[in-house]
Amino acid sequence: MKIAIIAHDGKKPEMVAFLLKHKELLTHVELFATGTTGGHVANAGLEVTKFLSGPIGGDAQIAAMAATHDLDMVIFFRDPLDKHPHEPDVQMLMRICDVHNIPIATNPATAELLFKASAQLNSL
């Protein structure tokens, strides 16, 4: 399974904590991340392929993977209370996921449900 992870600056610690909580599930997962998020995840000891930082093209790189069905899921912990200069890129990524039927979680509760469902499917 291939999962892309992205987190706005204020959500990066929450993303790392979420991934560490699910470390056992991630043993059979390839993680891809925007640059800064990927750096935080790598520093926590998880293996991750890093792309460019989101604002300089990382969101677009992940969207390209989604458009070519090279991803199974996107976890994007967004900060809805802050302004983001690259919001058009965020909207583009979400639209691409919708167009290509790629599950995308934008908060920990939804990500938790996707991980639980994935774990159940893999245990069948």
Image (tube, helix red, strand yellow):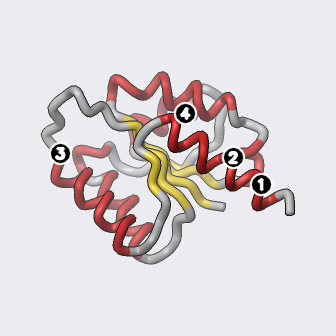
Q: Amino acid at mark 1?
A: Gln
| Cα distance in 3D space between marks 2 and 3 | 31 Å
| Tag 1 near tag 2, CB within 8 Å | yes
Q: Which residue is mark 1?
A: 120
The answer to which of 30 and 109 lies nearer the viewer is 109
The answer to which of 38 and 11 lies nearer the viewer is 11
Q: Which residue is mark 4?
A: 41
- As displayed, is residue 11 above or below residue 60? above
Left or right of 49: which side holds 21?
Answer: right
Disc nearer the start of the sequence (4/1): 4
Percent of width and height locating residue 82: 20, 27
Q: Amino acid at mark 4?
A: Val
Q: Which residue is mark 3?
A: 86
Q: Secondary structure at mark 2?
A: helix
Crowding at dot 2, Cα within 10 Å, few <14 / some 14-19 / many 20+, comes out as some
Q: Secondary structure at mark 1?
A: helix
- As displayed, is residue 86 above or below residue 64? above
Q: Residue at x 60, y 50 (%)?
A: 114
| Tag 1 near tag 3, CB within 8 Å | no
Crowding at dot 3, Cα within 10 Å, few <14 / some 14-19 / many 20+, comes out as few
Percent of width and height locating residue 36: 39, 35
Q: Nearer the viewer, mark 1 or mark 3?
A: 1
| Cα distance in 3D space between marks 1 and 3 | 35 Å
| Cα distance in 3D space between marks 1 and 2 | 6 Å
- As displayed, is residue 68 above or below residue 108? below
| Cα distance in 3D space between marks 4 and 2 | 21 Å
Q: Which residue is mark 2?
A: 116
